[in-house]
Image (tube, rainbow, N blue to C red):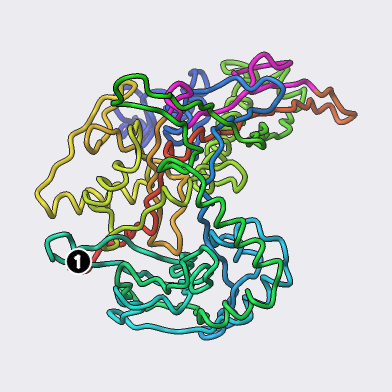
Amino acid sequence: MTVEQSTAAPGGAAEGGRLSLDTAAARNLATTTKTPPQMQGITSRWLLRVLPWVQADGGAYRVNRRLSHAVGRGRVAFGQAGDDDVTVVPPTLAELPPLRGLEDQALLSELASRFVVREFRTGDTIAEAGAPIATLWLIAHGKVDLSGRGKYGDHAVHGHLADGDHLGDEVFHAGAGNGGSNGRVPSWKTTARAATPVIALAVPAAEIRALIDRSDTLREHLAAHRRTRAKAQNRHGEAEIELAAGHEGETVLPGTFADYELKPREYELSVAQTVLRVHTRVADLYNKPMNQMEEQLRLTIEALRERQEDELVNNRSFGLLHNADFGQRLHTHSGPPTPDDLDELLSLRRDTHYLLAHPKAIAAFGRECTKRGVYPPTVDLMGSHVPSWRGVPLLPCPKIPVADGHTTSILAMRAGQEEQGVVGLHQTGIPDEYQPGLSVRFMGVDDKAITSYLVSAYYSAAVLVPDALGVLENVEIARPRG
């Protein structure tokens, strides 16, 4: 027996040799278990799930309302070339209630040129309650608290102003002796104090008065504004419906009718589209165990739906953040979202069905609740447990932007057409419909053997009455030190 034979391993295998089939080789005969293609960009898309969707035949949806005499209140925009070089964007001065609808750009530019920049430190007083209103103020940057004495002498905060807001527009009608204020100069009803460092722009009432005296156009516009304010209207600014109640005997009853807006707003369906391309060789040869076309289409539709929700929140034409009435916008009392802030937001409408917030805002609200020893319950919504406040589901919506990494907004919404709320708009029954309001249209095969499909989603959103949608703005989400 040779040395080699005497050192052979048991079973006949040489030292270091394998006794069985290698797993790497065995896998060549095995079937691999696969998952469908995964996608990180898919979110819960709660807004798309909770919005009631209304059929918009003809691609448009008209919102008819009662005639309103209330002159809207918007926000002024500013340009900035440096820390101390802030100017008013002249056309946006028409957002001031007395100037709403004024189209004389030269006049607006002249008024804008008269504003001067003023800076205030935290705690500085901008206007004192009871003092005559002698200045028109525009808040370019920062936060202002409006406070005064309550009925029983206690100190109370009545509201807040921030970027783009204004105070003192009474100067346009003050001291004219023309029916605006009977020649009297009105007084500040509240004290305005800087809650943060504030950059404001100011113009004295005397300069505005001089401009009015020189401009026939401005005088006529302000006179029309005063006549509008004098018309009978309810607290929402709608034309009053004359009624009689509590009378006895043969009282002559008033005649009345409900007038409508002459130019109601129409919402046209928007579209998100893409062209999906799949090579015919891929579709022919690699369809097992999963259909390549179906998987490509599934992921494309997920991306389209994500964009659709983003547009419903952020689009400047119909997005919810940009279509909330300015009377339905609030600022937080202290910065982070507190139970008090959400209570005030809920109080602005007769019913609120959903609150939507960025996940970081929900976390910030949770921290504020924990500080106060309050633990909001969860509610069951469509089979999921979600946080709530006062019984209203608080839903995560990462499409709500976070400005500068530390401030965001919270939406409060009443939903449904019968509730005069917010509705989503789409059109079903379109050609090559794949899902409601979404079509997949075959576009042919080109000379490179690539098949193309046009994937289109049609959608929009409408706010039926102003109090259907509210926004809590400038919500701070940064975690405090300590």
**Residue 48, percent from left and from top:** 48, 30
Question: The residue under label 1 is which amino acid type?
Answer: Arg
Which picture quadrant has residue 402?
bottom left
Nearest the viewer among 119 and 381 is 119
Q: Is residue 69 above or below residue 48?
A: below
The C terminus sits in image quarter: bottom left
Q: Is residue 431 magenta?
A: yes
The extreme right residue here reads 447
Residue at 62% x, 45% y is 317
Q: Which residue is mark 1?
A: 149
State which quadrant residue 119 falls in.
bottom left
Image position, residue 437 (x, y; %)? 62, 22
| 138 sits to left or right of 247 | right
Residue 139 forms part of the magenta stretch? no
Residue 80 drawn at (x, y percent)? 58, 77
Q: Kindly tell me whether residue 60 is visible in this rendering.
A: yes
Q: Residue at x 58, y 25 (%)?
A: 298
Residue sticking out furthest to the top: 429
- Of residue 3 and residue 65, the one placed in the foreground of this image is 65
Foreground residue among 70 and 341: 70
Q: Which residues are magenta?
A: 415-442
Quadrant assignment for the N terminus:
top left
Residue drawn at (46%, 74%) of the image: 137
**Residue located at (77% from left, 23% from top):** 280
